[in-house]
Image (cartoon, helix red, strand yellow):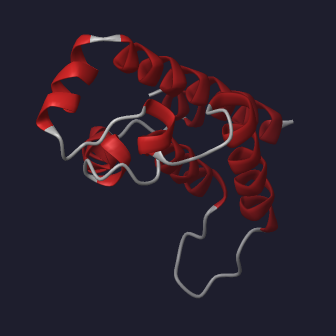
Amino acid sequence: MVAQEKLGKKNDDLIKALDPFGGGLGGHGEVCGAVVGGLATIGLLFGRDKAGEETNVNMWKYSQEFMKRFGKEIAGGGILCREIVQVNWMDRAQVKEYYQGEKLIKCKTLVGKTADLIGEMIERSKS
C-alpha cells in the first residue's frame, strides 16, 4: 500500500495477486513475501514496459541494494520465511501458535520495516 501511494499506482488486483506469497511463497517457508513485494515494487518503478525493451540499470541497482539491506537491517541475515519467523508452515500446530503469539508480531514488524525501506528508496529515486 505504501508503495502504491508513493508511486501513484493504486491497484487492488496487485495486492490480491501478491497475497499467496505470504508464509514464504504459499506457506512453504521459502522467500519471505515482503521480499517478493519489495522487488515487485522496484519492478513497478524501474521494470520494462514491454518484452524486448532494454533493462533499466536502476532496476538492478535498487534490487541489489534492497536485498542487501533487507537481509542485513530487517531480517537479521536471511530472506527465508522459515528462518526469519521460525515456523514450519506445514505443521498446523506451529501455524496456530504463530497466529497467537510473538511470531506474528515479528512478521508484521518486518513487513512494516520493509515498506519503510521501499518508501525511502522510492523517494530517493525521485531526486
Q: Position of residue 17 (x, y in %)?
A: 28, 50
Image quadrant holding the C terminus, namely top right
At 67% from the left and 58% from the top, the residue drawn is: 46
Q: Position of residue 60 (x, y in %)?
A: 75, 63
Q: Name above or below for residue 42 compared with residue 11.
A: below
At 79% from the left and 38% from the top, the residue drawn is: 126
Left or right of 37, for residue 115: right
Q: Name above or below for residue 79 compared with residue 76.
A: below
Left or right of 69, for residue 98: left
Residue farthest along the left direction in this orientation? 92
Q: Position of residue 90 (x, y in %)?
A: 19, 47
Left or right of 15, for residue 37: right
As rendered, which of 32 and 92 lies closer to the eye? Answer: 92
As rendered, which of 118 and 107 lies closer to the eye? Answer: 107
Left or right of 21, for residue 32: right
Image quadrant holding the N terminus, namely top left
Q: Position of residue 89 (x, y in %)?
A: 25, 42
At 20% from the left and 31% from the top, the residue drawn is: 95
As rendered, which of 34 and 123 lies closer to the eye? Answer: 34
